[in-house]
Image (cartoon, rainbow, N blue to C red):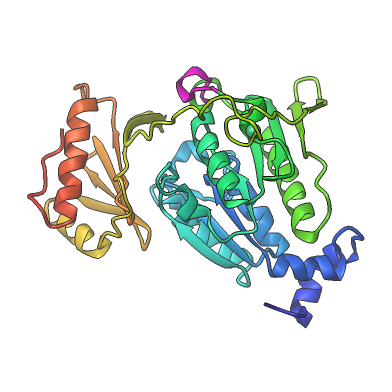
Amino acid sequence: MKTDLNDQELVTYSRQIAFDDIDYEGQLKLRNASAAIVGMGGLGSLIALKLAAMGIGRLRLIDRDVVARSDLHRQLLYDADQVGLPKVAAAVNNLDRLNPDVELEPVPESLNSQNAERLLKGVDVVLDGLDGPEGRYRLNRACQNLGIPWIFGAAIQASGNVSTIIPGKTICLECFLSGLKDDELPKCAVVGVHPSVLGIVTSLQVYEAVSLLVGHEPELMNKLLYIDLKDMEFHKIEFDPQQDCPVCGQSPTEEPESLDDKLFDEACAKDGRRTFLYTPSGNLDLDLECIAGGLQGAGYTIRQQSPQGITAARGEDYLLSVLKSGIIIIQSSPRVEIDPKQPAEEFCGALLAWAQGKGPLPILP
Ligand SMILES: [Zn+2]
């Protein structure tokens, strides 16, 4: 634990130190603090930029995806040369150049019911960069069990929401927003999102997280801030504690609704390519050097390579990403005229077996 700031830190953070609500003591607290960002997309990538620049001591970056060209207009942490790189790999590279003093922990995994507590354990605050309610319920329950505060944030089109949830002190997400399914809500790949609303939601999330870390009471406890840029309205909605909440209530009347971990799923199309995601049940810690060599030997071209994952191409029709944790992402071009869902799942399973030395390299569907 650091007990003082050095000369360079005094210069770097001078505007925060001059600001009463942070000052020298607060900056020192930020330097000794840690945060996890779950999801490094439209929200998480901006949160990571802001927290790294502000000098939070340690950032854990959790994401299962690779950078796509259609991310670049809003996910300002990434650049065009990084398309195809795992987002956590691209993030570590760029954040380290922004602020080399911040300790970065890239985690190329998908947060699910099994691993959520392992992935979040040991940090002071968690920031939500997810894109669907089911993932947020997993995050909510894990933070409740671990007693870690988290900052809920969501955005679509020109509107957004923010709330600060502190286990044992405030209501939880499922007190005021429960039972939603990912498939029932609009997706930003379909209805779009304005980058400005992401900038505002993430700025508010960071403000709340920093308030917590420096020891001030966050404003959005037991409150949901609703933002709509179309009419520039900000509404604060207050909530009462829910004693019967199945997740955080003192006297729950029922069990929390069960959440299925979808190990194979179709994701939003990337750059016009149908995209499938395969998640192994545990972290496989694959040997990526060996996998890259094997794929090259079989006629694939390696497009991106990093310690957290690789992306390989087979002609123009398929892009294949293998993450260190064992997550596989297949992107198929519109020219491939088969329904790839079932063959894609079988291919992913066989590819993972091959990657672990348990079978031949499968042929693409
Ligand atoms: Zn609750």
Q: Does the magenta portion include 185? A: yes
Looking at the image, which residue sits at the far top? 184
Q: Position of residue 295 (x, y in %)?
A: 17, 53
Q: Does the magenta portion include 72? A: no
Residue at 42% in and 47% down: 83
In front of the other: 303 or 329: 329
Looking at the image, which residue sits at the far left? 360
Residue at 66% in and 29% down: 175
Q: Quadrant of the N terminus?
A: bottom right
- Residue 229 can be seen, yes or no: yes
**Residue 171 position by quadrant:** top right
Q: Position of residue 255 (x, y in %)?
A: 51, 29
Seen in the picture, residue 358 relative to 10 is either above or below; the reply is above
Seen in the picture, residue 97 relative to 329 is either above or below; the reply is below
In front of the other: 284 or 71: 284
Give the extent of the magenta segment.
Answer: 179-187
Q: Is residue 127 left or right of residue 230?
A: left
